[in-house]
Amino acid sequence: MGCHAQVWTTSPMLEPVRRSFFAQKPIRWRQVNLLPDFVYFNHAIHVAKGVGCESCHGRIDLMANVYQAESLQMSFCLDCHRHPEEKLRPPEVVTAMAYVPPEPQEVLGARLVRELSVHPPVNCSGCHR
């Protein structure tokens, strides 16, 4: 149940989620973000390097119905890969919504690039397999 154990706990819209959880039967999900089959994407490396969930998925905590917040087009990904310091945060707070950095983002981001050895690929084979 994750967030829904605390957020909108009595929402009729989330009744299927609660029913699925307590019955221990999978819920039929509607995929929101879909990348083409030729695109390789690994959530784990992004999480480990400090890319916050809301950077790509938006403020899920404020969405009554989840929608695709960013285009996830190649240009969106490349912008981040070319300038990762603009989006990085400490990995332990990647899931924090409305994250506010404790110091200027440019200072924090530059430090995290060094500390976490962030070198995202910008060549075609980095994402196209």
Image (tube, helix red, strand yellow):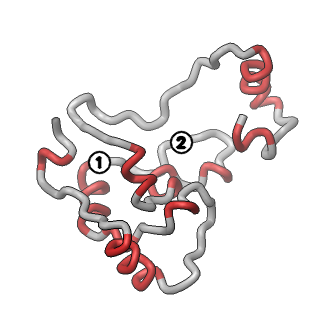
Q: CA distance from mark 2 to mark 1?
A: 15 Å
Task: Classify 10 Å Cα crowding around label 1: few (below 14), some (14-19), many (20 and above).
Answer: few
| Number of numbered discs overlaid on the protein picture | 2
Image position, residue 17 (x, y; %): 72, 26
What residue did someone put label 1 on?
A: 73
Q: Nearer the viewer, residue 9 or 51?
A: 51
Amino acid bearing label 1: Gln
Image position, residue 101 (x, y; %): 55, 77
Judge left or right: residue 49 versus residue 6: left
Q: Please tell me whether residue 61 is drawn above or below residue 82 in the rendered image.
A: above
Image position, residue 16 (x, y; %): 74, 22
- SS at mark 1 in the image: loop
Judge left or right: residue 4 versus residue 128: right
Q: Give the residue displayed 39% in from the left and 53% down from the top.
A: 46
Q: Give the residue displayed 21% in from the left and 44% down from the top.
A: 127
Pick the quarter of the image with the N terminus: top right
- State the mark number for residue 67: 2
Amino acid bearing label 2: Tyr
Judge left or right: residue 14 versus residue 87: right
Q: Give the residue displayed 71% in from the left and 44% down from the top.
A: 3
Image position, residue 4 (x, y; %): 75, 39
- Within the image, what quadrant is residue 9 found in? top right
Q: Earlier in the sequence, mark 2 or mark 1?
A: 2
